[in-house]
Amino acid sequence: MLLVSVFWAAGMALPVLAEENSAATRTPPVKEGRTKIKERRDANIRKFFANMARRLEHMISRLEQLAGRIESRLKKFEERGADVTGAREKLTLARTKIVEAKEALTAAKEKLEGVLSSQSPKEAFKEVREGLVKGVAAKIKEAHEALVGAVRALNGI
């Protein structure tokens, strides 16, 4: 306190106090902080979607491989003279479901930027998680069920 009064009596300002109150040393404005937080949230949502899209693509490719293996089994049974029309119908249904899952995934990738442009990051993440990812996952499950049906039809032959 004595030091402050000495500077004040001399008519000099304290250099430390002057620097603390300058605009250059203050914290950044609130808007800049909010934009940084939004950028981080958008990056996290993009990372989540990229991971999920990669996993969904792998699931779709595995279903395509299974469909190919089932197709080869159907050909072998047809060569032996077995009736495989029911299994072939279910395999065709499974292939259409796989194509629908691929289309849903590409549509989800296209919608991602539109969803991220919204002002509410919580709603954006909810839309990505429930609307886009779970929609594609549901299509993949339908394709899987159709492949299981084809295999069951083969077991009955």
Image (cartoon, helix red, strand yellow):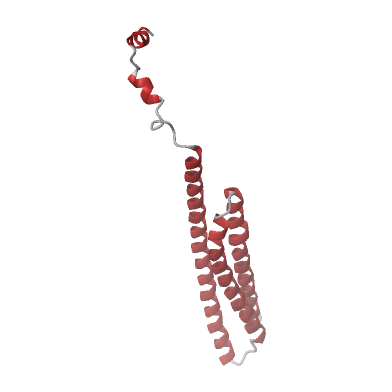
Q: Position of residue 64 (x, y in %)?
A: 53, 75
Q: Position of residue 48 (x, y in %)?
A: 51, 55
In the rendered picture of this protein, how many numbered marks are placed on residues? 0
Q: Position of residue 89 (x, y in %)?
A: 65, 83
The residue lying at 61 percent from left, 92 percent from top is 81
Left or right side of 28 for 99: right
Relative vertical location of residue 6 with respect to residue 124 in this rendering, above or below: above
Q: Position of residue 8 (x, y in %)?
A: 36, 11
The residue lying at 48 percent from left, 49 percent from top is 39
The residue lying at 36 percent from left, 25 percent from top is 19
Quadrant containing the N terminus in the rendered view: top left
From the viewer's side, name the closer residue of 10 and 139.
10
From the viewer's side, name the closer residue of 154 and 51.
51
Quadrant containing the C terminus in the rendered view: bottom right
Q: Is residue 5 visible?
A: yes
Relative vertical location of residue 72 with respect to residue 59 in this rendering, above or below: below
Judged from this view, the residue extending furthest toward the top is: 2
From the viewer's side, name the closer residue of 145 and 74.
145
Left or right side of 60 for 130: right
Q: Quadrant of residue 70?
A: bottom right
The residue lying at 59 percent from left, 61 percent from top is 132
Q: Quadrant of residue 88?
A: bottom right
Q: Is residue 157 visible?
A: no
